[in-house]
Image (cartoon, rainbow, N blue to C red):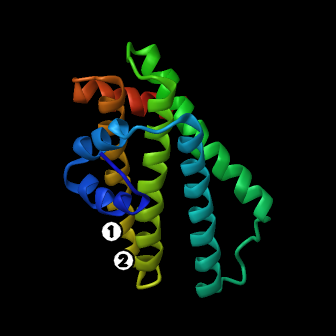
Amino acid sequence: MIDRLGAFLPLAVTAVFQPREAVRQVLDTPASRATIIEFGFLVIALSLSVELIFELFAQMPDAPQVPMSTSIFLQLISVFGLSALFFFVGRIFGGRASWDAALKAGIWFSFLMLIAQAIFLMLMLQSAVVAGFAMLWLIIFAMVQMSAITMETHGFENVLGVIFGILGSGML
């Protein structure tokens, strides 16, 4: 069980090697819906902070400037829309997750991707070759995490079914 905010970072490290165990700890953490949503907004704020810090250190004059309001809107859709996808698509395939569990799952996935993308952005500044390998790792990491989160949240046992369900949902 997670009893403080600082416990999420070591749990993110655990998620690399034992993704289902990490998700189970997140799902078993008692929290009200308001607390879950507050954590979602915290993840959004951290993501926007990483974006701003990256823009400060990586000067790209030809890059299009995205207004902060657009970034906030896209982050809201990303975090909470992903939670809705976890809930509805999983339910379509016979899953048994509650809305609060799907919120926790979507926010947890967003938190993991935030950490992975921050690492990727630092590696991207090193070289294009390193960035290419890091992107490959990021894609594999995202797929493993999404599969583990879906399986734990909905109680699915068929790994291939979950992977094909995720890929099929992504193609819609």
Q: Residue furthest front?
A: 3
Mark 1 nearby-residue class (10 Å; few <14, some 14–19, many ≥20)? few
In the rendered structure, which amino acid carries the disc numbered 2? Val
Question: Is 161 on the left-hand or right-hand side of 95?
Answer: left
- Identify the residue at image location x=66%, y=47%: 76
Within the image, what quadrant is residue 96 found in?
top left
Q: Are marks 1 and 2 in contact (CB under 8 Å)?
A: yes
Q: Nearer the viewer, residue 140 or 109?
A: 109
Q: Where's residue 42, x and y in %?
A: 58, 57
Q: What residue is shown with label 2?
A: 129
- Identify the residue at image location x=35%, y=68%: 134
The kind of secondary structure element at disc 2 is: helix
Q: Where's residue 12, x and y in %?
A: 33, 58
- Identify the residue at image location x=46%, y=65%: 117
In the rendered structure, which amino acid carries the disc numbered 1? Phe
Q: Where's residue 156, x and y in %?
A: 28, 23
Mark 2 nearby-residue class (10 Å; few <14, some 14–19, many ≥20)? few
Above-or-below relation of 33 to 40? above
Above-or-below relation of 152 to 3? above
- Identify the residue at image location x=26%, y=56%: 16
The quadrant in which the N terminus is found is top left
**Disc on res. 84:** none
Above-or-below relation of 71 to 159? below
The kind of secondary structure element at disc 1 is: helix
Within the image, what quadrant is residue 20 found in?
top left
Question: Is 124 on the left-hand or right-hand side of 141?
Answer: right
Q: What residue is shown with label 1?
A: 133
